[in-house]
Image (spheres, rainbow, N blue to C red):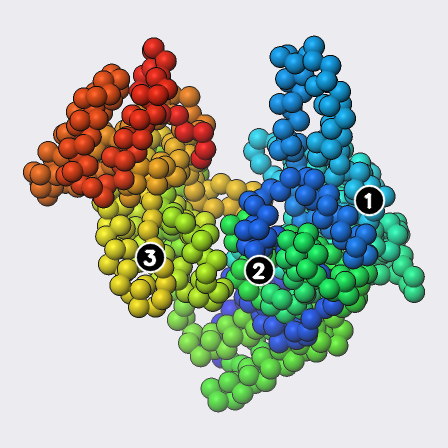
Amino acid sequence: MKKNAILIGLGLLIVLVFVGNASERFYRLNFIDQLSAVLYDYSLQLTMPDTLDERIVILDIDEKSLQEEGRWPWSRDRLALLVDKLFDNYGIAVAGFDVVFAENDESSGLKILQRLGKNQLKDNAEYQAVLTHIRPQLEYDTLFAEKIKNRKVVLGYYLSNQQEKSISGMLPEPIFQPGSFKDRPIAFISWNGYGANLPELQRAAASAGHFNPIIDADGAVRRVPMLAEYNGAYYESLSMALVRTLIGNTNVLVHFAGDGDNDYAGLESLGLDAVGGTLKIPVDSNVATYVPYRGKQGSFRYISATDVLHDRVQPEQLNNKIVLIGTSAIGLLDNRATPVSETFPGVEIHANMVAGILDQNMKQHPAYMLGVEVMWLLLTGIALSLLLPRLSPAYAMLVSLLMFATTVGLSLSLWQYGDLLMPMANSLVMISLLFALDMSYGYFVEARTKRQITGLFGQYVPSEVVEEMSHHPESVSMKGESREMTILFSDVRGFTTISEGLGPEELTELMNEFLTPLSRVVYKHHGTIDKYMGDCIMAFWGAPLPDTQHARDAILAGIEMQATLDALQPHFKERGWPPIHVGVGINTGKVSVGNMGSEVRVAYTVMGDEVNLASRLEGITKQYGVGIVVGEHTRNAVTDFVYRELDHVRVRGKNEPVAIYEPIGLISEVPQVMQDEVALFHAMRRLYCTQEWDQAESQLTKLQQMSPATRLYGVYAERIAHFRKNPPVADWDGVFVFQTK
């Protein structure tokens, strides 16, 4: 009886824990949230229609469009032509831009022509007349604004939360003015900045909406805030703006729980008046709506933007359609993780939202579902707490399984037939724990420190480092701090060209084939992987654990990364893949490291000028035809290597010139003939910097004979030839200036 009493008491305590978690008032259990997300994803995947919605078309700025029309952003006169064709030639119903036009378009050259008209040609009447005549044709922003004016065009913009408030462009008129909800306890997602469109474009557009999703802890997009708060006012999402524009810019109605006179009066839904009735948009406590994904990518027709520009699209494919203009191109970085795919175009998220609003098939989680979940937890929890200690193991398992199945069946029935979201993670975990408690009394003991550190750093550092951190937790900090560290960037050369020749699945497989071994090299040399940016790896040394050899470890990692890729080339050739080559940039210096981000998502990362310089160094490896470039601080920190001093450069974003070096290898391992070649190159560089072109060229000829395939020598040969014809200024310091990143 004593054992039963203890088990009943512990069982009721477990019930109270999960009731408290479900109430969302006292605390949140992260693993329950994660499990809820997984169960939500499975429920969604089981019930998606997986059909093609013909009403909505995604006009895709895809790789084909970039290849034919040039890199993004395109000039606004081209976009003006695109708008004309969409509305005049194809008769679309409404257009929404999943891009921001935050900067003036000066690609026409008008600014330069006007400067000439004010200076050198100010007295040239003929020039002034021609300039006056052609100016309207070259004011691309004005031209674009004229084309979207009086048309159903909805622009997009983003809201941001940064420590330093960032504001650009012009916001549209808010849907609700400040103070509209001052007496309502609504947890709007608030932002302190925005990146919006040029005022000229915003005033011409029919409407605009934000395209900020809510990114859950696992990085997936499941919800979109229909209203977001900035500076006390409330702004609508892009999807809601599109539907409102489509049906005639109707007012947004609000519906509160109860009769509207209650103190609680929680916001349950928004409404849009339309022909045939009100379109209801259910919202949760954050005034967000669950995205009603129809299926994986391709649930809507994709048409290349370039095909519209060149009239290669059948009229019926666009006539009277809702058109969303966005991108699926990997290089434009608008892909998101979602419950249906790890890489999903952001523009298709908006398409799913528009379709859901029109179809009225969105899942809802009204306030009263919290009460339903709590009551179910109490009912099942108390029953099992009292019953299980009195049952044999076989009957206890049978009863627990029956309660488990009933919970799943109830939740799926509400989902499928009532469009209601009843979270079941609390109930399922509670049932499992009550059964486990009964079966193994006193069994569970938690090792909290190691699990917390693994959760925080397991995705960044190798397991052996996590193990060491768990033994010395006092050395681990997530707070921002300044440290001397070494940062490495590696990026595949010509990746856009490579990706164009491969399908999505093969491209994903190729990336895994080279990112995995390169990541292992970083781990082997005690590095921390900051992030993957497409085909780029960013890593750092010196955190979270101190590392007195961080610069040396980074150089060794960079050299081994090159060797690892060389060893993979035969395998790539067997698979029919092109050869993969990476450039590696390494820099050492003081940086800020810690947990950084926003209220929506944070990451353990590094920031600072030295990080930016490392990225620039990677970018210029291809200019010199070398695999690795390190900064002078890195070179000074590791003195037992042979380095080739490549140049003194001024990179974009830095005023002071920096010396850049190529690490050849350990002094003890580099052959003497190679050391002699490096010494000869340095001698040539000294002659080059003192403008002794003949002697420098003579040394360079010897170098080219020693290593004909070394592109670096060709670079200097071209420079010397250039300076012979175009001598540098008298006080030239030998510094080469890079104008691009």
* Vertical comparison of 401 with 648: above or below: below
Q: Quadrant of residue 684?
A: top left
Residue 452 visible within the image: no
In screen coordinates, is 568 left or right of 418? Answer: left
Secondary structure of residue under mark 2 = strand
Residue name at image x 18 percent, y 32 percent: 701
Residue 206: mark in rendering? 1
Instruction: Between label 2 and label 1, give the one nearer the viewer.
Output: 1
Q: Which residue is mark 2?
A: 344
In screen coordinates, is 316 left or right of 489? Answer: right
Q: Which amino acid is tagged 3?
A: Pro
Q: Which residue is mark 3?
A: 579
Q: Looking at the image, tell me whether mark 2 or mark 1 is earlier in sequence order.
A: 1
Instruction: Between label 3 and label 2, give the one nearer the viewer.
Output: 3
- Mark 2–mark 1 Cα distance, whole angstroms, equals 28 Å
Q: Are marks 2 and 1 in contact (CB under 8 Å)?
A: no
The tally of labels here is: 3
Measuring from the top left, give residue 541's x and y in whole percent: 31, 42
Measuring from the top left, give residue 73's x and y in whole percent: 60, 42
Q: Which amino acid is tagged 2?
A: Phe
Residue name at image x 42 percent, y 52 percent: 495
Secondary structure of residue under mark 1 = loop
